[in-house]
Image (spheres, rainbow, N blue to C red):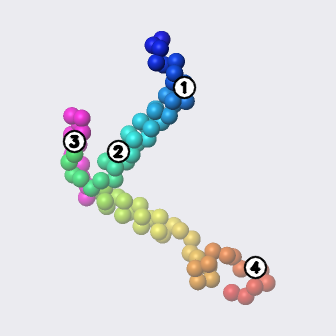
Amino acid sequence: MPEWTREFNSTFFLAVGSLTSASFALVLRYLIKSKCRRFSCCGLVVDRDVDAELKSEEMELAAKKHTEPPLINGGSTKHPSPDEKV
């Protein structure tokens, strides 16, 4: 084992690995959320249909909006007690 590895313990390597993974995840998230039709990175070229993705996101939001329960008492989420008049 090289001598320099004795100075660093597993916590250091765990931190470096976590930072690397988090950075990769942020870049990947940015690429997924971007509205670019074509992008390339490290020799990988991706062409995608952004319009279809936007439509599917809008449909998901519309479906979610219709499945949310309506708010009671003009926007309050507090449920009235049985003896309270509505």
Disc number placed over residue 67 in the picture, else none: none
Q: Spatial distance from mark 1 to mark 2, Cα to Cα?
A: 26 Å
Sooner in the amino-acid sequence: mark 3 or mark 2: 2
Sooner in the amino-acid sequence: mark 1 or mark 2: 1
Magenta-drawn stretch contains 52: no
Labels 2 & 4 near each other (Cβ < 8 A):
no
Nearer to us: label 2 or label 4: 2
Q: Where does the image place residue 20, in percent across and percent down from the top left? A: 41, 36
According to the image, label 3 marks what residue?
A: 40
Magenta segment: 40-51
Q: Spatial distance from mark 2 to mark 4, Cα to Cα?
A: 50 Å
Labels 3 & 1 near each other (Cβ < 8 A):
no
Nearer to us: label 3 or label 2: 2
Magenta-drawn stretch contains 50: yes
Give the quadrant of residue 46: top left
Sooner in the amino-acid sequence: mark 2 or mark 4: 2
Q: In the depicted view, which residue is nearer to us: 67 or 51?
A: 51
- On screen, 52 above or below 65? above
According to the image, label 1 marks what residue?
A: 10
Amino acid carrying label 2: it is Val
Q: Spatial distance from mark 3 to mark 1, Cα to Cα?
A: 35 Å
According to the image, label 4 marks what residue?
A: 81
Give the quadrant of residue 58: bottom left
Does dot 4 land on a helix, a strand or a loop? loop
According to the image, label 2 marks what residue?
A: 27
